[in-house]
Image (tube, rainbow, N blue to C red):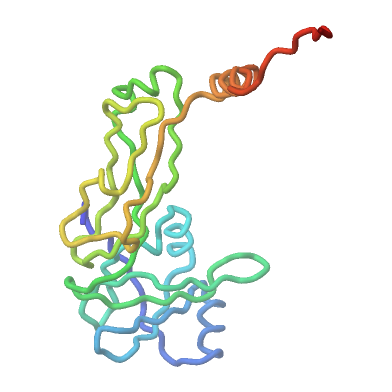
Amino acid sequence: MAGEIPDLEALERTGTGKGAARQARRDGMVPGIVFGGDKDPLPINLPFNVLLARLKKGRFKSTLFNLKVDGHDDVRVICRDVQRDVVKDLPTHVDFLRLRRTTKINLFIPVEFINEEAAPGLKKGGVLTAIRPEVELVVTAGDIPEKLTVDLTGLEIGDTVTISDITLPEGSKPTIDRDFVIANISAPSGLRAADDEDEADEPEADEVPATEQTEE
C-alpha cells in the first residue's frame, strides 16, 4: 500500500447492548465493534469528532487503519459499515473487520489521470469522460493501492482506456472478468453538433432529385 497506514485510536467499551451504546454517545463517543480474524469481537468507542473528520476526508471504507486500543495489540482493520442517524446523517455506530496482511478483500480504488497536456485529443478540444472514476478490485490487505494511474499520453479524440491498459498492483485483479472501459476522449459538443447537422443534410444513397415529368 502506498504511504503510511494511518493510526486510529479507540477505547475498549465496557458493557454491551443499547444502554452502553447510548451512554457512549452521551459521552461524545461513537460505539463500534471489531470482528473477524479468529478472535472474539471487541466492542470499542471512537471519539465522535475524530470519526466525523475521517468520514469527511472520504474513502473511509476503503482505507486500511492500524487500530490502537489500550490493553490490546495493534491490529489492521477496515471499515465494513457505518450506521447513521436517519435525520441528522451523523455516525451512530461503526463496524470494523480485522485483517491479516494476506487477507483478500474487495475494495473500490480511485482512478487518477495524468499527462493530460500530452494528449493530442484534449489539445484539440476533446473532452475526457471518466466512465469509472473508481474500480473495484480484489486486493491483498497488506498491499492496498492508494490509486490506479491512467497515462493519457498520445490519446486522440475517439480513443478509449480500458482496464487492460492499466498496470494493476501485484496480487490484485478486477472483480469484473471482461475488459471494460475506464474513460474515453470524445469530440467537443460543438463539433459533435456540427457533424450531426452535416449528416442530416446529406441525401440518402437511394434518394433521386425530383424532375419535371412530361407526357410522351
186 up-or-down from 60: above or below: above
**With respect to residue 67, does 58 lie above or below?**
above
Residue 198 pos. (x, y %): 60, 17
Which quadrant, please, contains the N terminus?
bottom left
Q: Where is residue 70 in the image (x, y as percent from the top left)?
A: 27, 79
Quarter occupied by residue 92: bottom right
Q: Which residue is drawn at 46% across and 59% down?
A: 55
Q: Which residue is drawn at 40% across and 57% down?
A: 59
Residue 149: x %, y % from top left: 27, 42
On screen, residue 209 versus residue 122, left or right, reads right
Question: Residue 35 at x, y = what percent?
Answer: 34, 84
Q: Which image quarter holds the C terminus?
A: top right
Q: Name the one closer to the observer, 139 or 32.
A: 139
Image quadrant of residue 97? Answer: bottom left
Q: Which residue lies furthest to the front in this view?
A: 216
The count of marks equals 0
Viewer-side residue, 117 vs 9: 117
